[in-house]
Amino acid sequence: MAERKGIEVSLAVAEAAAACDVDCIAAYPITPQTHIVEHLSDLVADGELDAEFIPVESEHAAMSACCGTSAAGARTFTATSSQGMALMHEVLFIAANLRLPIVMTVANRALSAPINIWNDHSDIMTERDSGWLQIFAENGQEATDLVPVCHRIAEDKRVLLPIMLNFDGFIVSHMVEPIEVLSKEEIATYLPPYEPQQRLDIDSPITMGPVGMPEVYTEAKMAHEDAVRSSYGPICEALAEFGEKFGRDYKPVESYRTEDCDILYIMIGGTAETAMNWVDTVRDSGKKVGIVRFRLWRPLPIEDFKAAVKGAKVLGIIDRHFSPGGAGGPVAQEVKYMLYGEENAPKIVEVVGGLGGRDIDFEMFENLYAKCDKVLKGGKVPPFELIQVRGGHYGEV
């Protein structure tokens, strides 16, 4: 296996994309993903990557260009963040429903206003219903490894869907970590050459994305839904084969020290690494608490999640985005959906924290444990709570 080297995560992600032999990158710079596409532009300019780099005037144009290059049969990669992905919003749905296997890395960042360049999950959770496959990395090695995995998944003939690879902006994207960056030759043993199933070709013309009259629109949406749900098997296969080949295993739902636990924390993204350190501390002092976190977000890994939390009495859910005026955070909403009607379903304590880059620390985990322990001992389940608010907290309205 390759030797680990100290490298900024964004640069390692860019080198992984280059090693996947991408044909085209169309991108617009936005903090904190800029270093990814900036490094790719350097690799193209220096002749180290034989690809087209398309500088565009906006993120909307970037995703539009990606749709064009992917439809023409090119292995296409891009990256974005926050307001940039919001500007792509219209085109994300087009890419998904045209079944274009684009890979996009997202350095998750808070949405304005007020302007904030730090990390939370408001950008990706706002786009959770765009029809893209969505997967999360917690650190630099995972983010780098999952680039070829995402290409493998997206381009699988049974899938043919775009995929977003998410990791925390700055907290992950700008860290220098010891990372094993796989070579082009190593990745070629895992990722086959891209063979588009249909493409725009003047010698064999086809139509993509014609008007969907009411007579066909519902069926088109159902076909897309079937494709997303059916991608689960190929996703699991791609993750498993990567583990077999390179020794690093990834699963749709991953657990940490969950054995014999009445209380489990549920989360997504880089926060889990801090939480695992906290769990190590408190488990050694006698508190039985573990962690279950989502790696795969779309399609939702329902059965894997149910199996992971089986036997737990209370789930403490930590969201980093919420629906203003609605039903709390998206992770909590999805968990409630998955467990609705289940016999002996655990009770749910939900909090939202870490917004706009505010630190998530051991004290937050301790406070959540106190809430969960109170419920475990017969107390009333508290309402959704927006924590870390200076001078108070959000409770019942």
Image: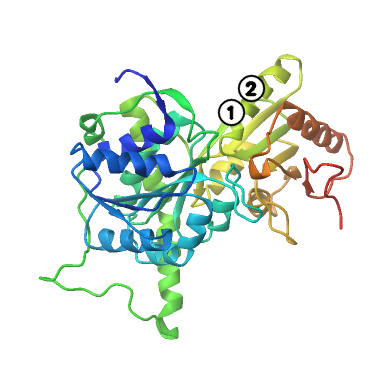
Residue 145 in view, yes or no: no
Q: Which mark is residue 184?
A: none
Number of numbered discs on residues: 2
Quarter of the view holding residue 72: bottom left
Q: Quadrant of residue 222?
A: bottom left
Q: Is residue 107 above or below residue 257?
A: below
Residue at the far left in the pictured view: 203
As shown in the figure, which amino acid type bears the numbered disc 2? Asn
Q: Tell me: residue 39, above or below residue 247.
A: below
Q: Position of residue 349 (x, y in %)?
A: 77, 43
Q: Residue sitting at 69 percent across and 58 percent down?
A: 323
Is 83 or 46 nearer to us in this picture? 46
- Residue position marked by numbered label 1 in the rendering: 273
Q: Which mark is residue 277?
A: 2
Mark 1 element type: helix
Residue 224 image-quadrant placement: bottom left
Q: Are marks 2 and 1 in contact (CB under 8 Å)?
A: yes
Label 2: which secondary element: helix
Marks 2/1: CA–CA distance = 7 Å
* Left or right: 347, with 277 as reference point: right
Query: Residue 119's x, y, as percent?
Result: 59, 42
Quadrant including the N terminus: top left
